Image: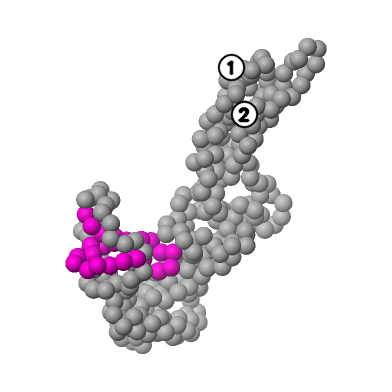
């Protein structure tokens, strides 16, 4: 087992492990650490703990020091410089008539590099722009193209639910999301209703997916024949959320519909609900906006 702390460099950013060395670091402390791109300023979000070597990405970098007042002041100054750099770069992009959208600017803590994040529909020849920026800022310049999900994470905003977007408030990584998840959760297959601000499938489709998968493995499909405490019957409906199955039974000369819990029935013939064929899923198109969303809806970028 190895002692580590978890450090985050941006709000809702990915958490990286570092060796605390001899420092008594607690959650909430600001630290100066050695990273692959140089010295960086970050916040300790996981206090000192022991993890197995398998969870460590080698080589494990070290904490240089706990940030002092000078370090915190320099970090604030870097943030102010980033706002100025954003304004300057926007003007230069306009001058060069480049088809790109500038999203954010980031100074490394030691000011050895300035990173400009942008989105674009295709490749952009920004060589002249880089020359201009290098002349102005007199340091290394990196222009990094990002996808629409990263753009949404950086900018932030409110999701369709009315709450701050998950990606910009607590999600460190983007999980893979598929249209099959919406189908298995019996959600609307209208692109507008299952898409986030970024135009991609909403990340929250993944949150309860494992629960739905577990229930569907035990939930008979409509048309299946099941054994109940009152005899055999045909499944006419079911509810994943309630874990309830509706069964048509014969009681004397009458047919009745009864509800049973999954644990109260036994499958005799038919299938369980865990077999959803993604290739047969059809989206519900209601407007021109839905048609525009379909093109990019399934992209992971």
Compared with 63, 294 (above or below) is above
Q: At x 71% / y 25%, what residue is drawn?
A: 258
User: Which residue does the numbered mark 2 point to in the structure image?
Assistant: 261
Q: Closer to the camera, 292 or 243?
A: 243
x, y percentage for residue 250? 74, 15
Q: Which mark's residue is nearer the viewer, 1 or 2?
A: 2
User: Which residue does the numbered mark 1 point to in the structure image?
Assistant: 268
Q: Closer to the camera, 43 or 279?
A: 43
| 233 displayed left or right of 112 | right
| 213 displayed left or right of 292 | left
x, y percentage for residue 2? 21, 54
Quarter where residue 246 is shown: top right
Toward the left, the furthest residue is: 22
Q: At x 28% / y 67%, what residue is drawn?
A: 25
Q: Which residues are magenta?
A: 2-27
x, y percentage for residue 140? 30, 78
The Cα atoms of the two marked residues, 1 and 2, are separated by 16 Å
Toward the bottom, the furthest residue is: 136
Residue 12 is a magenta residue: yes
Compared with 136, 11 (above or below) is above
Sequence-first tag of 1 and 2: 2
| 171 displayed left or right of 141 | right
Q: Is residue 27 visible?
A: yes
Q: Closer to the camera, 77 or 64?
A: 64
Residue 55 is a magenta residue: no
Q: At x 69% / y 27%, what residue is drawn?
A: 259
Q: At x 26% / y 59%, what residue is drawn?
A: 4
Q: Tell me which colouring the rendered structure shows.
A: one colour
Compared with 76, 173 (above or below) is above
Q: Is residue 124 visible?
A: no
């Amino acid at each position: 087992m190895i002692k580590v702390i978890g450090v985050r460099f941006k709000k809702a950013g990915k958490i990286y492990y570092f060796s605390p060395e001899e420092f008594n670091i607690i959650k909430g402390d600001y630290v100066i650490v050695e990273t692959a791109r140089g010295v960086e300023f970050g916040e300790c979000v996981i206090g000192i703990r022991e993890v197995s070597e398998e969870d460590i990405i080698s080589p494990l970098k070290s904490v240089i020091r706990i940030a002092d007042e000078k370090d915190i002041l320099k970090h604030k100054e870097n943030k102010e410089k980033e706002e100025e750099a954003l304004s300057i770069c926007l003007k230069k992009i306009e001058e060069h008539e480049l088809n790109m959208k500038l999203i954010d600017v980031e100074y490394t803590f030691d000011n050895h590099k300035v990173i400009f994040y942008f989105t674009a529909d295709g490749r952009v020849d920004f060589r002249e722009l880089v020359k201009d920026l290098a002349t102005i800022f007199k340091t290394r310049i990196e222009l990094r193209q990002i996808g629409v999900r990263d753009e949404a994470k950086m900018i932030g905003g409110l999701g369709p639910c009315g709450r701050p977007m998950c990606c910009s408030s607590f999600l460190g990584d983007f999980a893979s999301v598929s249209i099959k998840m919406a189908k298995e959760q019996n959600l609307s297959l209208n692109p507008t209703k299952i898409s986030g601000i970024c135009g991609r499938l909403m990340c929250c489709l993944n949150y309860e997916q494992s629960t739905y998968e577990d229930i569907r493995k035990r939930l008979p499909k409509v048309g299946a024949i099941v054994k109940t405490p009152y005899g055999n019957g045909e499944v006419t409906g079911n509810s994943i959320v309630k874990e309830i199955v509706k069964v048509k039974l014969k009681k004397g000369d009458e047919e009745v519909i009864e509800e049973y819990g999954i644990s109260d029935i036994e499958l005799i013939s038919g299938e369980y609900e865990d077999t959803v064929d993604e290739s047969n899923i059809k989206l519900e198109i209601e407007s021109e906006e839905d048609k525009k969303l379909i093109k990019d809806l399934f992209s992971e970028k």
